[in-house]
Amino acid sequence: MGNETGTVALNNYLQSQGQLTLLTWVDTPSGPAHAQRWTSVFSGQPIGTGTGAQKFIARDMAADIALATLRGAT
């Protein structure tokens, strides 16, 4: 499991906790085209924001932050 991308790891974690349906993505880009920002929202609260030239890069970064936040909260 150490090779999982941020989004896969976050999805797997939430599924194991029975909370996958609480995850949503706000896919409204902001910022310059080369470093757009994307936000992950858990249970209505933004818990991770990532930046990247491509959405999947930014989402993985946001997911890594969200996963660390959720693991710290449990």
Image (tube, rainbow, N blue to C red):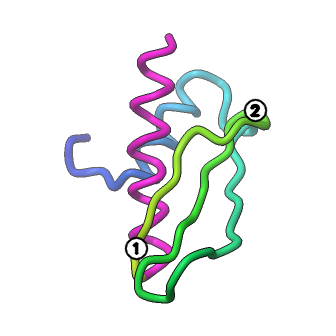
The amino acid sitting under disc 2 is Ser
Where is residue 56 shown, x and y percent of the image? Answer: 45, 71
- Given residues 58 and 24, the one toward you in this image is 58
Q: Residue furthest front?
A: 31
- Given residues 18 and 42, the one toward you in this image is 42
Q: Residue furthest top?
A: 74
What residue span does the magenta drawing correspond to?
54-74
Q: Which mark is residue 13?
A: none
Where is residue 66 shown, x and y percent of the image? Answer: 49, 38
Is 7 colored magenta in this rendering? no
Reading the image, the residue beneath label 1 is 52
The amino acid sitting under disc 1 is Gly
The residue at the point 68 percent across, 37 percent down is: 42
Q: Is residue 45 above or below residue 54?
A: above
Locate the N terminus and report the quarter of the image it occupies: top left
Which SS type dominates the magenta stretch?
helix
- Given residues 3 and 64, the one toward you in this image is 64
26 left or right of 2? right
Where is residue 55 shown, x and y percent of the image? Answer: 50, 75
1 left or right of 47? left
Nearer the viewer's eye, disc 1 or disc 2? 1
Is 55 colored magenta in this rendering? yes
Reading the image, the residue beneath label 2 is 43
Q: Residue furthest bottom?
A: 33
